[in-house]
Amino acid sequence: MTKNKNVLEWIEEMKALVQPDKVVWIDGSEEQLKEIRNISLACGEMEALNEEKLPGCLLHRTAINDVARVENKTFICSRKKEDAGPTNNWEDPKEMYAKLRRLFDGVMKGRTMYIIPYCMGPIGSPFSKVGIEITDSTYVVLNMDIMTRVGTDALKQLGDVSNDFVRGLHSKADIDEDNRYIVHFPEDNAIWSVNSGYGGNVLLGKKCFALRIASYQAKNEGWMAEHMLILGLENPQGEIKYVCAAFPSACGKTNLAMLIPPEVFAKKGYKVWTVGDDIAWLRPGPDGRLWAINPENGFFGVAPGTNIKSNPNALASTRKNTIFTNVVHNLDDNTVWWEGLDKNPPKNAVNWKGEKWDCTDGSKGAHPNSRFTAPAINCPCISSEFNNPQGVPISAIVFGGRRAKTAPLVYQARSWEHGVFVGSTMASETTAAAAGAVGVVRRDPMAMLPFCGYHMGDYFQHWLDMGKKLGDKAPKIFNVNWFRTDDEGHFIWPGFGDNLRILNWIIDRCEGKADAVETPIGYEPKPEDINLEGLDISMDTLKGLLNVDISLWKEEVAGIKEFYGKFGDRLPNELKEQLAKLEANLDK
Ligand code: GDP
Ligand code: PGA
Ligand code: MN
């Protein structure tokens, strides 16, 4: 497959460690994938679904202790502890390698070792990067084939001499929770993952490479790897403006990226095009603006809640050649179901744990973090720029999270520096995307808390440096919150397609077409500038959604101070000044 000695030597070394019975290089051909699919079906790792209703679709169930990312088992093993920073788990790389070598020693005896060369980003793009993942899981092979560009093209992109590829080693081993490790060695371009079979832990191109390793590379090379969707908003004149948005896992990236405009907007000719739903790699282009590519080739989306009303584009993306993980298996017609798909849970079904299930006992059939892995080309609103090697120019960056109170529906940062402050102080309620408690508010700067591959203080500094480089061509920065709740805990803002109403104001601000009002936390829309046509929401409700509660924000300041305290002298002065300014504004 390749003459590249760096690749071949590394493969030999790994082979000696894991001692597989058989080695298979993934070339990306249809024939080979078909073969692997058959192996996966034969060994029970996958089940084939109804060929008429869901052609090419497969079902997989993970072990019940292995359903989400494991942040407490995720490590950044830089040589120096301080380079991993206060927000990452760290162990000395020598000790960690020794521990992992013991776990990988002979782990593939009796198994096949698959070697997956893959490219993050369009083949031929100067921004793309290559990785190779070794795995003993056909589930990983078939998912990686959807999520990335795999096979000979990726090796061609790497070339015969380059050493610039990410070395990924994965084994399901025994899915032993106590010995589960997701470990990154940024200085070695290496990721070792063991004892898990859940997507976010084992599809190493995704969060592990495209965020944790890439963020480290990006800092050194002068670009940015961010946990952001990329969408294009087309106006009635046919002009398309691109927006990136960073929300924590399970906080609405996939939904926003595939938004369908409400009828009043659709009639006028507004459209949304999806470039990416999870990760953006951003660089200043020759014109001085910030340009983004989506390094991925598919969507690893949250299934529950996805339906014909909330996200028809996501649903359409999953109707062929898709892998479903931990959803309900409808035995009557061999299809899939999840909470929020429709109001008719199947009567004759198997739940995500593999048990007979008929919804009468009140239990959930699909795991809250059940997922679909769907090819990007399936998406009805995929952008014509999806494969553009140069990417798309970004007008606005949007931060957001789940906050029942405090954060208003939308506000704009006063400057790039203030925007970095807003991003760095983001907080959001935890979700089922990671193991642990759900609904606890935690700081999640730029939605990168679990994904930054180096010291977060240095990461903030990198953001500030990028702003200096971009100068007045820098995108404008905003913050949104779709998740404010009323006293009964119901979401007040309808969200989903109606989020276009907010995006529209955001673009208008970037173009200098909309006014704003100054508040202690930044610029807010004049309520009358948010188009509520066709919505059952009163002006007063909107005003409530935009309200800045001074006493809550004073509590927020206290929380930020405590959080910032972690970073010691690596916290940039600009951010300390922004915090002081916020405090002063609240006292005015
Ligand atoms: P991602 O993991 O960031 O890509 O998040 P998803 O787009 O998959 O959404 C995660 C969950 O949030 C799903 O249950 C969605 O139904 C829900 N969600 C997404 N957008 C909105 C919104 O605008 N309002 C509300 N209330 N829920 C949303
Ligand atoms: P997402 O990513 O929830 O941000 O879509 C997948 C994951 O967290 O495993
Ligand atoms: Mn998503």
Image (spheres, rainbow, N blue to C red):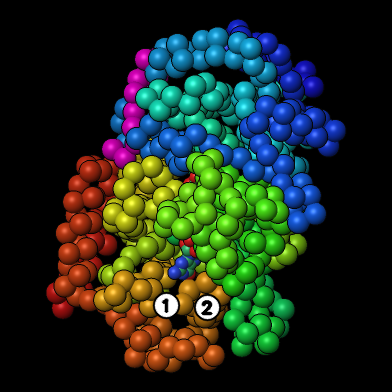
What is the three-letter code of the residue carrying label 2?
A: Asp
Quadrant of the drawing holding the N terminus? top right
Element at badge 1? loop
Residue 92 is inside the magenta segment: yes
Name the residue that disc number 2 marks: 498
Q: Nearer the viewer, residue 126 or 543?
A: 543
Quadrant of the drawing holding the C terminus? bottom left
Tell me if label 1 and label 2 are in contact, CB under 8 Å: yes
Residue 307 seen anywhere in this rendered image of the structure: yes
Q: Which residue lies at the image location 71% right of the left edge and 16% below the top edge?
A: 23
Query: Which portion, as a residue range, is magenta?
Result: 86-95
Q: Mark 1 or 2 closer to N-term? A: 1
Element at badge 2? helix
Q: Which residue lies at the image location 49% right of the left edge and 30% below the top edge?
A: 196
Residue 293 seen anywhere in this rendered image of the structure: no
Q: Nearer the viewer, residue 373 or 381?
A: 373
> Which disc is residue 417 wearing?
none
